[in-house]
């Protein structure tokens, strides 16, 4: 590594440590404020429904990369607690729609309250220009990561090991 690469590495390490520290704090805060005991897969499913409103079991299975049967089990558990509801597609009676139910809607209302609390408690202490700059930098880095993609990363790792 060159001196610049060493410096970049150290800076990125400090950035990652700070992000990890903040995320850990926010996760603890979130756990204290949210009483829901949902699994990560249940949360992913609820997020998908929130972003896509009414979807089919097949669409959820495809998105989550799991079987329709596994989605059915997740949906059944969430349906028992009124996080989701099922309805028959009137245009295709063999197809089942899944959508957020009362507990699911309340879950996202509480999520919104937590985001607003974090914003007012922490981000509001930054200047507006700093928030704009932070947003632009994070979005730029995200675009670089998405553009490069995981295939390039895997190939680079194999190349460095001399495996390709």
Image (cartoon, rainbow, N blue to C red):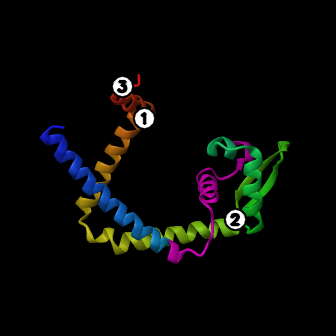
Q: Which image quarter holds the C terminus?
A: top left
- Label 1 belongs to which residue? 149
Would you place residue 117 above or below residue 95 in this image? below
Would residue 14 appear left or right of 153 to someone viewing this image?
A: left
Query: What are the residue bounds of the magenta stretch?
Result: 31-59
Secondary structure beneath label 1: helix
* Outermost residue, left side: 3
Q: Residue at (70%, 56%) from the top-left corner? A: 99
Is residue 53 among what the camera can see?
Answer: yes
- Label 3 belongs to which residue? 162
Q: Which image quarter holds the N terminus?
A: top left
Q: State which tag comes first along the sequence, 2 or 1.
A: 2
Q: Position of residue 162 (x, y in %)?
A: 36, 25
Q: Position of residue 98 (x, y in %)?
A: 73, 53
In-front residue for pair 3/92: 3
Q: Is residue 74 magenta?
A: no
- Give the Cα separation between the discs numbered 3 and 1: 20 Å
Q: Is residue 44 magenta?
A: yes
């Amino acid at each position: 590594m060159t001196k610049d690469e060493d410096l970049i590495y150290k800076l990125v390490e400090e950035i990652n440590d700070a992000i990890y520290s903040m995320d850990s704090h926010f996760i603890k805060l979130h756990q204290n404020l949210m009483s829901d005991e949902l699994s990560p897969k249940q949360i992913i499913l609820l997020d998908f429904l929130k972003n896509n409103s009414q979807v089919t079991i097949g669409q959820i299975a495809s998105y989550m990369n799991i079987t329709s049967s596994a989605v059915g089990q997740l949906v059944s558990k969430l349906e028992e607690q009124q996080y989701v509801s099922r309805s028959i597609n009137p245009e295709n009676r063999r197809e089942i729609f899944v959508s957020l139910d009362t507990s699911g809607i309340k879950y996202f209302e509480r999520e919104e309250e937590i985001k607003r609390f974090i914003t007012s408690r922490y981000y509001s202490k930054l200047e507006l220009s700093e928030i704009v700059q932070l947003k632009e930098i994070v979005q730029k880095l995200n675009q670089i990561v998405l553009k490069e993609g995981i295939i390039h990363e895997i190939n680079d790792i194999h190349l460095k090991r001399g495996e390709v």
